[in-house]
Amino acid sequence: MKITELVCPSCGGKIETDGKRTISFCEYCGNKLSVETAHSVGYDMEYGRLNARADIGQALAAEVLELTEPLCNMAMYKKNLVAINNRMNILTRQIKAKENGKSYMPYVWPLVGGGFLFIFLMALKANIIVFLMFSILIIGCFYISANNYLSTWERLKLELEQRNNQFIDLNTRIENCNDILSRHHNIIIPEKYRTKEAMEYIYHTLQGQGAFSIEEAINKYEIHKQQKQLMDMQAQQIELQKRQIQEMQQLRKETKRNSVARGAGSAAAAAGTAIVTHEVIKQIRKHF
């Protein structure tokens, strides 16, 4: 057994201890000493290493969680931004055309046509009732046309305002995503895994300490995806086998019913033949 000699920090006395004990007492002053053994030092080092790996995994998980939206939605945000911008340009041109009075023309033509018809009725010397009914009709058409014009104008302006708010919101989201990507530029996730399902799996794997690096989490995701595909294939095969068994059972039932029907038909035919034969024999006996 290896004996280790220590010096008491209080009185300077010499203390002898073996390698198994972690606590010793000074024989002279009774001071309590903590003795570090190779086992305890190794344990502390391993514990510290595992804690450091866990901290790294937790930090990576937090970064992956923050990167989920930029990596998964950035392309969609940019595509929607272009579509909204195009729609805003169309709405702006339509509103500008209405403000310039060009869109009044569809409502002016009914009035012009009504004026010509009014002159035509005057030439025919129609009575006052016809003129009144026609005037009420013209006023009603004008009111409906004007109301439709104003409601369309308000609808276009309201839609333009909504699209403008969406445009601002998308711009803000894209700026936030770019800021997140710039802050986590050292985290590299391949394009193949920039989906919500993959990112969530990588995050939960790192968070649960199932992996301590992005590469390890991606490898676990690939294994998980292969297992899922295999389970889906097995489920499909089981479902196919169930359908085949049901079809075979149905076929057997139909075959059995057909067999019974053929047997009954044969018996009926035999009975009919016997009855006919019996009647023939009776007729022959009557003659002889």
Image (cartoon, rainbow, N blue to C red):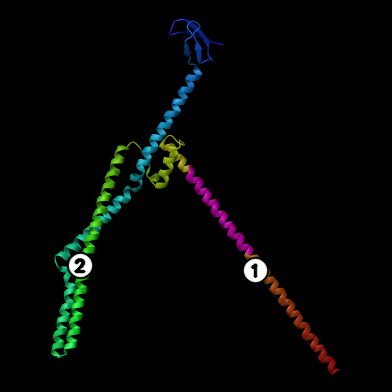
Please tell me whether residue 112 is drawn above or below residue 121 in the rendered image. above
Q: Position of residue 266 (x, y in %)?
A: 73, 77
How many residues crowd mark 1 within 10 Å: few (<14), some (14–19), many (20+)?
few
The residue that appears at 18% across and 79% down in the rendered structure is 138
Near-viewer residue (124 or 2): 124
Query: Which of the pair 71/171 is nearer the observer?
Result: 171
Q: Which residue is mark 2?
A: 150
Q: Are marks 1 and 2 in contact (CB under 8 Å)?
A: no
In the rendered image, residue 24, in percent from the top left (x then y), is placed at 50, 12
* Pick the front one: 64 or 190: 64
* Span highlighted in magenta in the image: 223-249
Predominant secondary structure, magenta span? helix
Please, what is the three-letter code of the amino acid marked with disc 2? Answer: Leu
Mark 1 → mark 2, Cα distance in angstroms:
70 Å
Q: Nearer the viewer, residue 126 or 167?
A: 126
Is 116 a magenta residue?
A: no
Q: Total number of numbered labels?
A: 2
Locate the C terminus and report the quarter of the image it occupies.
bottom right
Kindly identify the amino acid type of the residue bearing the numbered disc 1.
Glu
Residue at 46% over, 22% down? 44
Q: Tag on residue 194?
A: none
Q: Is residue 275 something one can see in this rendering?
A: yes
129 lies above or below 65: below
Indicate which disc, 1 or 2, sits on the residue closer to the N terminus.
Answer: 2
Nearer mark to the viewer, of 1 and 2? 2
Q: Quadrant of residue 221?
A: top left
In the structure shown, which secondary structural element does the residue marked by tag 1 occupy?
A: helix
Residue 153 position (above or below residue 12): below
> Relative to 127, does residue 79 appear above or below in the rendering?
above
- The residue pinned by badge 1 equals 254
